């Protein structure tokens, strides 16, 4: 009797899910490299869309090739090609215009070549698919662990000692009629001497128009910090951020505590206790949004900074621009928000109750999308708030783009202020300040390159109706809200000495004391001198 030999069982290979992993990888990678400035909720929509797109591409290739494994390999190759566009584009910019055409041709032909290769390839590729599964899953798992551990630390922030300003005592009777209070931030607007000496721009007429509208201008004002969140967290909370910096430690990168300090600050809490409504305008920059305001106002919705940056890694955005849909990126969304805010600031003060109005205008700070006449440029590279010469090219290009935006806002803002004053039913206090100066030579990775005069020389002007108060010439933002609450509500908030700190973007809490002769490179920060 002949016993049949047992046939070997066909070797099972894992389901080739690598097209999904490779589609998710750019989303997770970009988030992981910027998570200190983002919220995890930003991941939801891109992750869902990337997963759906991966399955759709995989299914379409399966219908073409009639083989799930080959379709999966080709789908993964597609995502690697599709999401490398941004890197190829940046490489062509670094190499110069002569490299643009060859790189474009190679990039455009690469995907059709892969399709032809796959169509002519008859053998299945289980081993290759298994290797891609392992590789893609390992890369995705690494990013998930990075994000998860960071979010876990973010969910359990260190305990910060209470600031002396957290409980403000009122030692005198408040003003008989509570004024409207506007807190307007012109991001990166430089001091008069900086504009004249570095940017060759004379804003004398702008400052004179402010004085004609009742403002006092601190002609030698200087920032307390060289970053937006630090300045606003300090000013709105009526004190320096030293306690938070010490609690976080010099290696911390998480900006969420600063964002929380801005969103729930001592100034708005104090004013709410005195019958104020709060009105906040969206800026498009998550770090300075007051979404819990009684009225949170935003213009036309558009792409977030994270979504726009994702699109910049693919050919989608250039294709949309080529079809005439040029204003779909975060740059234009932010620019339209600036225009919306300028158009609607006056109506925010028409409330029968006193209001505190907060508006952070991303201008003249990059991206340089406004022309001097207020029209918008069709395309500006680098959809991000990042400042400094690394992103925006040479100092010459930075100065030209910045000067156009200074000219735009300097001509536009006086009319907005006139409308605020004309429509207000009560006296109107206006704090007009910049969070920091510009950065034509700024390298945020090396503080030794910092031009202290440029970065810390800021615009600061205040309108204080009914008060005989003179601003010190070197006034700084930490004292702005203190002055208003002291003069109009009798708050026990004496002025603090003006002290300035620098820090890198990656380590915002590693503060360096700035002096007139340079910077003292040490940590922990040397606190401000005792109040007089």
Image: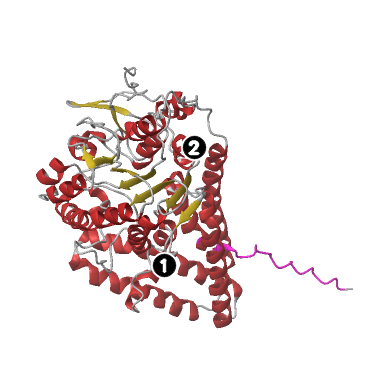
Toward the front, the furthest residue is 176
Q: Residue at image x 35%, y 37%? A: 231
Q: Dot 2: few (<14), some (14–19), or many (≥20) neighbours within 10 Å?
A: few
**Mark sitting earlier along the chain (2/1):** 1
Toward the right, the furthest residue is 1
Q: Residue at image x 28%, y 60%? A: 91
Residue 110 image point, x, y percent: 37, 73
> Which image quarter is the N terminus in?
bottom right
Q: Is residue 457 above or below residue 328?
A: above
**Can you identify the residue that label 2 sits on?**
274
Seen in the image, is 466 located left or right of residue 152? left
Q: Which stretch is magenta?
A: 2-22
- In reply to whether residue 16 is colored magenta, the answer given is yes
Locate residue 340: give its quadrant. bottom left
- Residue 81, disc: 1
- Residue nearer the viewer, 498 or 111: 498
Q: Residue at image x 44%, y 34%? A: 252
- Residue nearer the viewer, 70 or 21: 21
């Amino acid at each position: 009797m002949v016993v049949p030999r047992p046939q070997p069982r066909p070797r099972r290979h894992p389901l080739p899910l690598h097209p999904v992993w490779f589609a998710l990888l750019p989303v997770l990678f970009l988030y992981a490299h910027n998570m200190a400035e983002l919220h995890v909720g930003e991941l939801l929509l891109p992750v869902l869309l990337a997963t759906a797109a991966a399955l759709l591409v995989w299914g379409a290739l399966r219908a073409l090739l009639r083989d799930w494994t080959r379709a999966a390999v080709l789908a993964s190759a597609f995502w690697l090609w599709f999401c490398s566009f941004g890197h190829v584009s940046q490489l062509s910019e670094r190499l110069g215009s002569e490299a643009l055409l060859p790189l474009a041709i190679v990039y455009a032909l690469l995907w059709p070549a892969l399709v032809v290769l796959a169509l002519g390839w008859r053998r299945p590729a289980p081993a290759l698919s298994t290797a891609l599964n392992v590789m893609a899953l390992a890369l995705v798992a690494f990013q998930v662990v990075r994000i998860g551990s960071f979010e876990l630390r973010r969910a359990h922030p260190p305990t910060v000692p209470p600031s002396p300003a957290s409980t403000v005592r009122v030692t005198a009777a408040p003003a008989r009629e509570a004024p409207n209070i506007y807190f307007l931030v012109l991001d990166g607007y430089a001091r008069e001497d900086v504009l004249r000496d570095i940017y060759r721009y004379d804003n004398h007429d702008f400052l004179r128009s402010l004085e004609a509208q009742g403002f006092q201008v601190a002609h030698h004002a200087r920032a307390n910090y060289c970053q937006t969140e630090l300045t606003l967290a300090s000013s709105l909370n009526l004190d320096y951020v030293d306690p938070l910096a010490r609690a976080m430690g010099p290696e911390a990168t998480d900006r969420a505590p600063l964002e929380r300090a801005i969103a729930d600050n001592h100034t708005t809490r104090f004013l709410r206790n005195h019958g104020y409504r709060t009105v906040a305008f969206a800026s498009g920059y998550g770090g300075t949004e007051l979404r819990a305001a009684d009225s949170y106002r935003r213009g036309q919705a558009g792409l977030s900074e994270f979504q726009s940056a994702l699109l910049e890694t693919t050919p989608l955005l250039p294709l949309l621009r080529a079809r005439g849909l040029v204003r779909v990126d975060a740059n234009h969304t932010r620019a339209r928000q600036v225009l919306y805010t300028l158009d609607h600031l006056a109506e925010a003060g028409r409330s029968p109750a006193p209001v505190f109005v907060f508006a952070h205008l991303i201008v003249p700070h990059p991206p340089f999308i406004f022309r001097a006449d207020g029209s918008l440029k069709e395309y500006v590279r680098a959809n991000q708030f990042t400042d400094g010469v690394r992103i925006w090219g040479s100092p010459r290009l930075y100065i030209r783009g910045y000067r156009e935006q200074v000219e735009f806002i300097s001509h536009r803002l006086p009319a907005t202020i006139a409308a605020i004053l004309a429509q207000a039913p009560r006296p109107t206090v206006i704090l007009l300040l910049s969070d920091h100066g510009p950065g034509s030579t700024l390298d945020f990775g090396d503080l030794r390159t910092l031009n202290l005069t440029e970065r810390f020389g800021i615009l600061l002007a205040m309108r204080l109706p009914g008060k005989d108060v003179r601003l010190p010439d070197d006034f700084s933002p930490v004292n702005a809200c203190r002055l208003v609450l002291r003069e109009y509500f009798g708050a026990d908030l004496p002025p603090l000495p003006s002290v300035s700190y620098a820090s890198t973007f990656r380590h915002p809490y590693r503060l360096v004391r700035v002096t007139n002769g340079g910077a003292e490179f040490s940590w922990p920060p040397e606190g401000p001198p005792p109040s007089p």
